[in-house]
C-alpha cells in the first residue's frame, strides 16, 4: 500500500551518489550534519552542471536513521559496503573529524521535476536547500523491494562485510546493465 507525502526540501548530493541511490546500489548518503528532524526530502544532484540552466530531481528519500562514524576500522567496513573508497572516507574524516551517514529509503518521483541550477552547486553537497515548490510524492515506486532494503539496511547498520564480495560486485554490475538496457529501450 502506498502513502503520500509532501516534500519542501532537498538534500544535495554528488550526482554519482544520487545515481547510485536511484539505482538501488546504495541506501546511504553522507550529510554535513546529523539529520533527525527532516523525515523525508528530495534528493538533488549538486555538481557537474557547468552550463546547465536546470537540475533534474528524480527521487525522494525517507530518513531511516543517521549514524556518526570516526573509527578507521568502521570506515574500512563502510568502504566495502558502499561505493565510496576507503581513501575518500579517510580524507573526509580528516577534514571533518566525523562522518554523518544517513540511511535512506529511496523512492522515484512519479514525474521528475526541474529546478534552477542557480539553487545548487558543489558547495551545497551534504546540505539541504528549500525547494521552490512543494512536491507531492508517493511510496509507490521504491528503488528496492522491502526484503532487499531490510537486508541491506541491517548489513550496513551492523557493518556486516559481505561474505562473497565478488558476488556483490557482480550483482551491482547486473543492476547497472539492466538499468542501461531499460534506458535504451525507453528512448525508442
Image (spheres, helix red, strand yellow):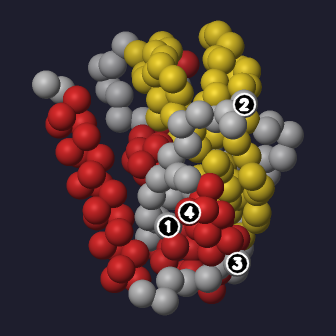
Residue found 61% across the figure and 69% down from its top: 151
Q: CA distance from mark 3 to mark 4?
A: 15 Å
User: In whole angstroms, how far apart are the C-alphas of marks 2 and 3?
Assistant: 28 Å
Where is residue 154? Give x, y as percent. 68, 71
Circle 2 residue: 3
Q: Earlier in the sequence, mark 3 or mark 4?
A: 4
Which of 73 and 98 lies nearest the eye of the viewer? Answer: 73
Closer to the N terminus: mark 3 or mark 1? 1
Assess whether mark 4 and mark 3 are in contact (beta carbons under 8 angstroms): no
Q: Please identify the residue farthest to the bottom as the structure is shown.
A: 163
Rendering quarter of residue 166: bottom left
Q: Which residue is mark 1?
A: 82
Element under disc 3? loop
- Residue at the limit of the structure toward the top, as seen here: 133
Q: Between tags 3 and 1, which lies in front?
A: 3
Q: Is residue 63 above or below residue 171?
A: above
Percent coordinates x, y for residue 31 in the rendering = 66, 49
Give the answer, above or below, for where 43 lies relative to 82.
above
68 to the left or right of 89:
right
Horizontal and vertical percent for residue 181? 20, 45
Element type at marker 1? loop
Kindly identify which residue carries mark 4. 148
Please name which of the two marks, 2 or 1, marks the residue nearer to the observer. Answer: 2
Residue position for label 3:
158
Dot 2 or dot 3, earlier in sequence: 2
Does residue 127 show up? no
Q: Residue furthest front?
A: 1
Amino acid at each position: 500500500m502506498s502513502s503520500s507525502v509532501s516534500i519542501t526540501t532537498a538534500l544535495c548530493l554528488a550526482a554519482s551518489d544520487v545515481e547510485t541511490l536511484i539505482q538501488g546500489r546504495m541506501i546511504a548518503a553522507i550529510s554535513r550534519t546529523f539529520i533527525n528532524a527532516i523525515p523525508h526530502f528530495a534528493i538533488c544532484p549538486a555538481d557537474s552542471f557547468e552550463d546547465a540552466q536546470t537540475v533534474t530531481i528524480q527521487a525522494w528519500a525517507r530518513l531511516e536513521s543517521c549514524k556518526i562514524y570516526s573509527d578507521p576500522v568502521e570506515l574500512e567496513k563502510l568502504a566495502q559496503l558502499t561505493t565510496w573508497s576507503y581513501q575518500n572516507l579517510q580524507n573526509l574524516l580528516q577534514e571533518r573529524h566525523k562522518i554523518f551517514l544517513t540511511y535512506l529509503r529511496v523512492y522515484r518521483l512519479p514525474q521528475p521535476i526541474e529546478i534552477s541550477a542557480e539553487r545548487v552547486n558543489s558547495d551545497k553537497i551534504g546540505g539541504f536547500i528549500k525547494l521552490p515548490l512543494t512536491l507531492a510524492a508517493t511510496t509507490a515506486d521504491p528503488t528496492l523491494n522491502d526484503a532487499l532494503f531490510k537486508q541491506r539496511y541491517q548489513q550496513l547498520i551492523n557493518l556486516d562485510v559481505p561474505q562473497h564480495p565478488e558476488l556483490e560486485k557482480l550483482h551491482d554490475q547486473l543492476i547497472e546493465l539492466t538499468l542501461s538496457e531499460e534506458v535504451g529501450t525507453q528512448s525508442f
